[in-house]
Image (cartoon, rainbow, N blue to C red):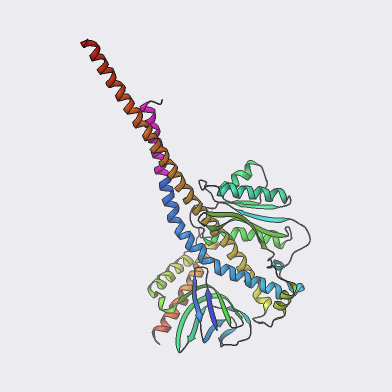
Amino acid sequence: MNLKILTPEKITFEGDIDELIVPTITGEIAILPHHIDLLTQVSDGELVIKNKGKQEHIAITGGFLQINKDTLTLLADYAVHSEKINAQKALEAQKRAEEILKKKSEHTTEQDLAIAQAEMRRAILELKVARKRKHV
Amino acid sequence: MATLISLRRRIKAAQNVSKTTRAMQMIAASKLKRAQDAALAGRPYVQKLTELAQDITLRTEDAKKHPFMRLSIDNDKTLLIAIAPDKGLCGGLVTNLLREFFIYSRDEKNAQMIVVGKKLENQVVKLQNEVLAAFHFGTTLPTFDVVFPIIKLINEYYLSGKVQSVKVLYTDFVSFFNQSPKVVQLLPISLPESSDQEKKNVAQADMLYEPSLEEMVPELLKHYLEMSLFQYFLETYLSEQAARMIAMQNATNNAKDIISGLKLEYNKTRQAKITGELLDIIGGRTGAQA
């Protein structure tokens, strides 16, 4: 089956795979070929792609997964390969976001807060996935 | 024949112009790269999201449809969001966009307008058309927060039934040499043209929803609205930069042509003057000797 991961920034993954494990808001599910057509909401977490005995890990924040006759399309807000995660940078981003959230003043708008929160969410997720994969 | 001094002045002026246009061309070229990356990268995502939204619309029974999916019949007013750049000097881009805008506002008397970009705002103010809101477009790559205030207005007008549909006027980036203004429908979600049979096939195909469709739809449609609108901003920005780069390149070339023409004339005039002076001297001398 074919998988395509699209984010607003780029196409993160495109190719044939054997199995996909994806976190959805109702729990983690594994998808094998000939799965019934499905539309589901993906939650923050780690995506595992298995292909010919090899595994790839991708951190994603929220989105939608559509399965249409063995063609999988994942629309994610953000997606990054686990080996491309820069833990140092993620840590810094987390700190920066934390500070913005802490220092709330009348100058910070609702949007600033939303952006900081989203950044924090992303940083935490990246760190989680990076840590997990280092110990494998 | 022009005097030497005035010719020199004109050469100088043309040189200054060519320097300025050249600088603007370089700036546009460097901005273009980033704009291209952002806009072209977003295309597949937005396209798929739109397909998904259309797909779901087809599959949902009429009674259960989210307001974004169906046409309300209360009135025939539309809400037009017109996106234009803040700055000019980008060839025919703004003119074309304005023409499209006025055609639209003439045809649709009931349209409510939200305008983005100073170029459009100025024209609209001049003609004293009424607008709901005006935003600036900015001169740098649009950031995602530009969509929020507009989305808020859309929700306010669309969900309360004050308007029946929401459309966007933007400049579509076809290639570096071709950018054309376009009006597209944002809400309700427009369905691709296909036969009823095809529609039926899609609607009846088995599909599992996890969680239920009703729970996912609002989130998905909100996403669709934000992302599509943002994509139109990116396309407009990309078109603006491409148009400006080409326009400024042409301007630089024209200025160079003018400079070389003027230089030729200047040199000819100078030569003629020297020859004339020499003739005077020689003539004077032969006269004295005789």
Quick check: B56 left or right of B118? right
Give residue A108's position: percent from left, percent from top: 51, 60
Magenta residue span: B1-20
Quick check: B121 left or right of B29? right
- Residue B281 higher or lower than A75, as above or below: above
A10 and A114: which one is in front? A10
In this orientation, does residue A87 appear?
A: yes
- Residue B143 higher or lower than A46, as above or below: above
- Residue at 50% from the left image edge and 46% from the top image edge: B89
- Residue A125 higher or lower than B181, as above or below: below
B80 and A14: which one is in front? A14
Task: Point out the residue furthest to the right here.
Answer: B74
In this orientation, does residue B60 appear?
A: no
Give residue B222's position: percent from left, percent from top: 62, 68
B32 and B209: which one is in front? B32
Give residue B193's position: percent from left, percent from top: 70, 67
Quick check: B150 left or right of B89? right
